[in-house]
Image (cartoon, grey):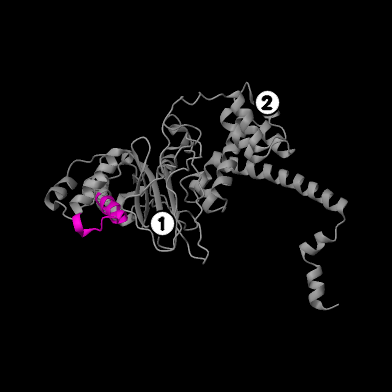
């Protein structure tokens, strides 16, 4: 037997193939028990890291971002583990049922929003060894939603898109549900899906007012922008919106009033940060949280950015460029706890950190038979029921 054969025989796949049917099934159950025990350890550790909010010291604005970006969990798995770990603080029986295999992680996550002190044990027991679909039905039976309003309406005809350009050989992509689909099926409101390294499909539902604004903008742009080039129209509109918001929130402008702003710097000390200081700090920090962890990692949060006094204003810190930096809400709170102590601030902030539940969607890009990606037509607008417009924009 050659060295290659010996090496091949040592691989995990080969070892599994040599097991008898009985041993294979027994080993599988043993591995599942080990996985359940490991899952409990993970949940307890995630819960404790979340309770202590240690993710902030690692330069993350939330436990979710820490799990996704540092622990490299998928978005859905991160959400489920955080949700179950937090619920287990109040309902420890969740961990017990996951550990003994009576409840899977997805099922536990489905139960979490409905658990109370009175129904927890009974509801968890009812979900024992149930599939995801069975648990969804269990919850639907016990927590009945209001009936869908009765209505009779004409089904839409197959859409004929205006401003539509379909490349030769590209498959047609329906923008509307087929006539044989349930009329109550909601139209997906938001979707951003990559079509290539520099191209995205952006889909959303708009009302008649936005449709009218789009048409008016196209009329005003005239021949400077091709009629079907929606991406350029929205890009120009967003340029104006971003410029306006940066000006109002951070004082960013191409023509600062130098004399007036210099005079504002000399005013009596105030908690309000002068406009020129906000502008300089925002540009210096690049619109991003400036917190840096001990190992040199900088927080990447850009949403909900706040201005933070390095030396607290209450302790004489001035509102000057050298003493002000950008912080996300989480790291601004962390700095306040360091400066004033967590106990003294507990009355201002809740003891638990809650994150907005995210809507995870996986968009699938279809491929042509030749291997190229075949997305929707480059720019198109089609009518949808209820006075809305459905846009598919590729930039």
Left/right placement of residue 346 relative to residue 287 reads right
Residue position for label 2? 121
Q: Which residues are magenta?
A: 222-240
Residue 64 x %, y %: 51, 45
- Quarter occupied by residue 120: top right
Q: Residue at x 84, y 48 (%)?
A: 26
Across and down, in percent, residue 69 comes to 52, 53
User: Residue 190 location in percent, x, y?
Assistant: 42, 44
> Where's the C terminus, which quadrant?
bottom left
Residue 203 located left or right of residue 247: right
Task: Give the x, y percent position of residue 25.
Answer: 83, 49
Of 265 and 31, which appears nearest the observer?
A: 31
Q: Residue at x 81, y 68 (%)?
A: 9
The quarter of the image holding the N terminus is bottom right
* SS category of the residue bearing label 2: helix
State the image quarter where residue 304 is shown.
Answer: top left
Report the predominant secondary structure element of the magenta stretch.
helix
Whether residue 310 appears in this view of the structure is: no
Instruction: Looking at the picture, tell me which residue is in the foreground, 232 or 170.
Output: 170
Reply yes or no: does residue 223 show up in magenta. yes
Q: Residue furthest top?
A: 118
Q: Residue furthest left?
A: 259
Q: Which residue is mark 1?
A: 200
Secondary structure found at label 1: strand
């Amino acid at each position: 037997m050659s060295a290659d054969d010996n090496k091949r025989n040592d691989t995990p796949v080969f070892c599994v193939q040599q097991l008898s049917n009985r041993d294979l099934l027994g080993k599988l159950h043993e591995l599942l028990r080990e996985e359940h025990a490991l899952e409990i350890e993970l949940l307890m550790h995630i819960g404790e890291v979340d309770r202590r909010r240690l993710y902030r010291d690692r330069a993350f604005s939330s436990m979710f971002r820490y799990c996704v970006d540092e622990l490299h969990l998928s978005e859905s798995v991160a959400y489920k583990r955080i949700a179950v770990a937090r619920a287990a603080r109040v309902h420890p029986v969740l961990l017990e049922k996951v550990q003994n295999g009576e409840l899977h992680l997805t099922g536990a996550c489905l139960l979490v929003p409905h658990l109370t002190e009175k129904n927890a044990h009974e509801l968890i027991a009812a979900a024992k060894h149930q599939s995801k679909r069975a648990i969804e039905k269990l919850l639907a039976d016990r927590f009945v939603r209001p009936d869908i309003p009765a209505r009779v309406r004409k089904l839409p005809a197959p859409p004929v898109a205006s401003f539509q350009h379909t490349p030769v050989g590209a498959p047609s992509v329906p923008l509307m549900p087929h006539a044989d689909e349930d009329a109550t099926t909601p139209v997906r409101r938001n979707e951003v899906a990559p079509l290539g390294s520099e191209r995205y499909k952006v889909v959303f539902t708009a009302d008649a007012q936005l449709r009218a604004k789009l048409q008016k903008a196209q009329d005003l742009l005239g021949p400077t922008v091709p009629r079907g080039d929606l991406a350029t129209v929205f890009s120009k509109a967003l340029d104006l919106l971003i410029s306006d918001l940066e000006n109002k929130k951070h004082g960013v402008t191409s023509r600062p009033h130098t004399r007036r702003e210099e005079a504002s710097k000399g005013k009596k000390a105030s908690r309000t940060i002068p406009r020129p200081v906000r502008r300089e700090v925002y540009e210096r920090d690049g619109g991003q949280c400036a917190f840096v962890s001990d190992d040199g990692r900088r927080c990447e949060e850009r949403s909900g950015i706040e201005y933070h006094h390095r030396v607290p204003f209450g302790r004489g810190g001035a509102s000057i460029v050298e003493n002000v930096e950008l912080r996300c809400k989480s790291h601004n709170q962390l700095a306040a706890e360091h400066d004033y102590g967590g106990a003294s601030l507990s009355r201002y902030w809740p003891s638990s950190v809650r994150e907005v539940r995210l809507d995870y969607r996986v968009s699938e890009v279809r491929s042509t038979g030749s291997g190229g990606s075949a997305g929707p037509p480059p720019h198109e607008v089609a009518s949808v029921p209820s006075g809305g417009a459905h846009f598919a924009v590729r930039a």
